[in-house]
Image (spheres, rainbow, N blue to C red):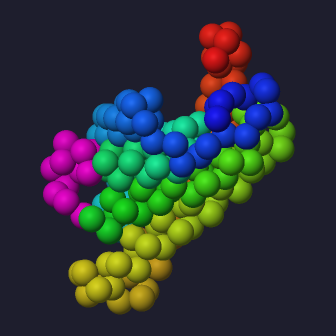
Amino acid sequence: MQDTHTTGKKKNIWAFGTKQVVYAAIGAALYAVVTWAFNIWQIPGAGNVGIRPAVVIPMFFGIAFGPIVGFITGFVGNILADMLSGYGFWLWWDLGNGVMGLIPGLFSALIYIYNEKKSILLGEVSVVLGVALGMALASVSEMWVSGADINTVIFANFLPAFITNVLWGLVLLPILMVAYAAIVQRSGR
């Protein structure tokens, strides 16, 4: 099915062919590099939680190209960013970042015109749900993996990650959606 912002046609959000592989690779690379560049801004006392505007990248790639692309962008991009930053491999946080792209990707089935108010509102809802689920998965996993207590999980992991990621997503996703709509319209895709 055609993926377009102007025709209103249904799109196959589960499509995963050559285009989606390319989109996922570009998204993961972009997410990794931008995250690495901003990893110098850590929130004190928040267990390696940083101020990362790059979190919008998997969210946007999910909205624009579907849940699989969104998940891969967040999952692989976070692995690469952690490697570039010297943080090591934290599978549960990588999965959480993947979920932050997957959930908006599920909402992409409802979004046909990216610069429409309804679509932007759906995108914003997907940001809150994606970040809540993704960061809850990662934070709660710290209890089993690292032996963290519930207070640490909530106050040092979940809340700092949730608040900063939601704020970046809510501010930057609408900008990217409107810009993407203009690019798609100009290119005739």
Q: Quadrant of residue 156?
A: bottom left
In depth, the one of 182 and 131 nearer the eye is 182
Q: Is residue 79 left or right of residue 189?
A: left
Q: Is residue 80 left or right of residue 43?
A: left
The quarter of the picture where the C terminus appears is: top right
Residue 39 falls inside the magenta stretch:
no
Residue at (64% x, 60% y) in the render: 128
In depth, the one of 9 and 183 nearer the eye is 9
The quarter of the picture where the N terminus appears is: top right
Q: Position of residue 163 (x, y in %)?
A: 56, 61
Residue 38 shows up from this direction: no
Magenta residues, start to end: 79-90
Residue 89 falls inside the magenta stretch:
yes
Q: Quadrant of residue 43?
A: bottom left
As drawn, the residue found furthest toward the front would be 1
Q: Is residue 96 above or below residue 118?
A: below
As drawn, the residue found furthest toward the right would be 117
Residue at (26% x, 51% y) in the render: 79
Q: Is residue 106 left or right of residue 115?
A: left
Residue at (35% x, 53% y) in the render: 75
In depth, the one of 104 and 52 nearer the eye is 104
Residue 112 shows up from this direction: yes
Q: Position of residue 86 (x, y in %)?
A: 16, 50
Q: Position of residue 28 (x, y in %)?
A: 35, 39
